[in-house]
Image (cartoon, helix red, strand yellow):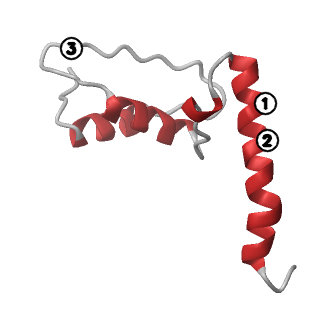
Amino acid sequence: MDTHPRKVIDRETVPLLAHTIRQVSEFLGCEALDLVLIDSVELAVSTILRSLPLAEGDTILTLSTGSGENPTPTSLYHTLNQISFKPS
């Protein structure tokens, strides 16, 4: 391990993350500045839900494929409750 972890992050990790974002943005056909890397599917879903202008009467449909790192209904309900959206 380097004795200066900040230098490792600045010189190695940040350029690798920037490269990854550019590659993924090319694949998706979007601008690199419009793309964000997020730690988990659950955090991504929570971030997206919090950015939507949800109102009373809006419906959110969820489904589970039963594999991978899918958010559980409990975590979705927790996020929706935090943004004052009451699931039915």
Q: Which residue is mark 3?
A: 58
Tell me which label, 2 or 3, sits earlier in the chain: 2
Q: Position of residue 43 (x, y in %)?
A: 48, 42
User: Is 22 situated left or right of 67 in this image?
Assistant: right
Across and down, in percent, residue 29 comes to 68, 16
Query: Mark 1 — residue?
Result: 23
Where is residue 38? Give x, y as percent. 58, 43
What secondary structure is found at the residue carrying circle 3?
A: loop
Residue kind at label 2, given as amino acid type: His
Left or right position of 73 against 85 = right
57 relative to 86, above or below: above
**Towards the viewer: 4 or 56:** 4
Residue appearing at x 74%, y 65% in the figure? 10
Q: Secondary structure at mark 2?
A: helix
Residue lying at the far right in this picture: please name it: 1
Q: Nearer the viewer, residue 5 or 49?
A: 5
User: Where the N terminus falls, by quadrant?
Assistant: bottom right
